[in-house]
């Protein structure tokens, strides 16, 4: 009983430890700095921040700094999910990717693993953020993104339709979207549809024909071209790779 209790106590980050190493302020400062860089998509700086954070914790016992790193790395992902949720942009593929990333982080058992995997971790954050922003952008673009994500199924999504819903000209919306997102609305819509299709191909038993038609791709040849532009492979090649 006493032995188990001692082991349990060693794993706890005590209040005294937090105060002695000024952990609360350090964690808050690193998190604020990291999100500031993520907002500007300065990913190399993000790698530096996470590396510095890991090294700063080396004064602690290994079980303690691994515990703090795990909480910190996971909290970044959960904070991003909360931002998506507030913006009504949270989709199953984002949750699935987040879950896989968190599951991987939870398996790291040493500080060396955290440091070595920082580039991989940043790549996962880049995927999660992709074309979106952690801060509020132009209100018309934000609403357009919400409409796109809400109406991905079917074929109603066009620049003209979106502009009508927002009460602005299609030219003005196209310009705003290009400035903030960095690509045309049509290209973005196609990419989002393909992302949803690949998610359903992976996690459902529906046929490819059923899924592509669900998302408005009535022409098989056009669908194959669109899929390959986004994924770099044909739908068949993608499914074969997923089965390996």
Image (cartoon, rainbow, N blue to C red):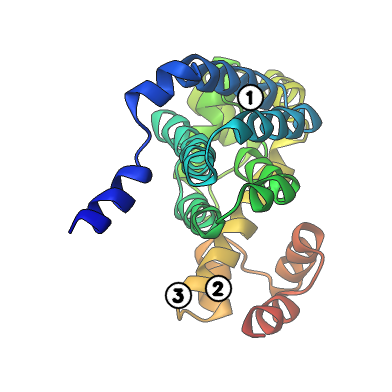
| Residue found at x 68% / y 70% | 219
Q: In this rendering, would 92 be left or right of 188? A: left
Q: In this rendering, would 14 be left or right of 48? A: left
Residue situated in front as seen by the camera: 97 or 158? 97
Badge 2 vs badge 1, beta-carbon distance below 8 Å: no
Q: Nearer the viewer, mark 3 or mark 1?
A: 1
| Residue found at x 42% / y 33% | 82
Location of the N terminus (image quadrant): bottom left
> How far separated are the C-alphas under marks 3 and 1?
36 Å
Task: First in sequence, mark 3 or 1: give its number.
Answer: 1
* Residue at the extreme left of the image, as rendered: 1
Q: Position of residue 55 (x, y in %)?
A: 68, 33
SS at mark 2 in the image: helix
Q: Nearer the viewer, mark 2 or mark 1?
A: 1
Task: First in sequence, mark 2 or 1: give its number.
Answer: 1
| Residue found at x 63% / y 41% | 125
> How far separated are the C-alphas under marks 3 and 2?
6 Å
Specify the quadrant of the image occupied by residue 216.
bottom right
Badge 3 vs badge 2, beta-carbon distance below 8 Å: yes
| Residue found at x 62% / y 41% | 158
Q: Position of residue 164 (x, y in %)?
A: 53, 26
Badge 3 vs badge 1, beta-carbon distance below 8 Å: no
| Residue denoted by label 2 | 201
SS at mark 3 in the image: loop
Q: Is residue 220 visible?
A: yes
Q: Position of residue 193 (x, y in %)?
A: 60, 55
Mark identifier at residue 204: 3
| Residue denoted by label 1 | 34
> How far separated are the C-alphas under marks 2 and 1?
34 Å
Location of the C terminus (image quadrant): bottom right
């Amino acid at each position: 009983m006493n032995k188990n209790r001692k082991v349990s106590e060693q794993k706890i980050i005590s209040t005294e430890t937090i105060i002695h190493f000024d952990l609360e302020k350090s964690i808050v400062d690193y998190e604020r700095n990291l999100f500031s860089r993520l907002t500007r998509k300065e990913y190399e700086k993000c790698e530096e921040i996470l590396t510095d954070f890991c090294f700063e914790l080396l004064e602690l016992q290994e079980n303690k700094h691994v515990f703090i790193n795990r909480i910190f790395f996971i909290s970044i992902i959960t904070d991003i999910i909360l931002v998506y949720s507030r913006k009504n942009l949270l989709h199953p593929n984002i949750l699935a990717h987040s879950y896989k990333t968190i599951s991987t982080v939870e398996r790291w058992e040493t500080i060396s693993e955290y440091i070595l995997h920082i580039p991989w971790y940043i790549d996962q954050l880049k995927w999660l953020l992709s074309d979106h922003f952690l801060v509020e952008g132009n209100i018309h673009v934000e609403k357009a993104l919400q409409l796109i994500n809400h109406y991905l199924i079917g074929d109603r999504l066009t620049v003209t339709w979106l502009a009508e819903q927002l009460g602005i000209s299609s030219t003005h919306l196209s310009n705003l979207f290009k400035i903030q997102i960095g690509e045309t609305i049509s290209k973005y819509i196609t990419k989002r549809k393909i992302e949803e299709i690949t998610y359903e191909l992976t996690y459902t038993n529906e046929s490819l024909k059923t899924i592509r038609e669900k998302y408005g791709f009535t022409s098989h040849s056009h669908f194959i071209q669109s899929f390959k532009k986004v994924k770099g492979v044909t739908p068949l090649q993608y499914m074969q790779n997923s089965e390996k």
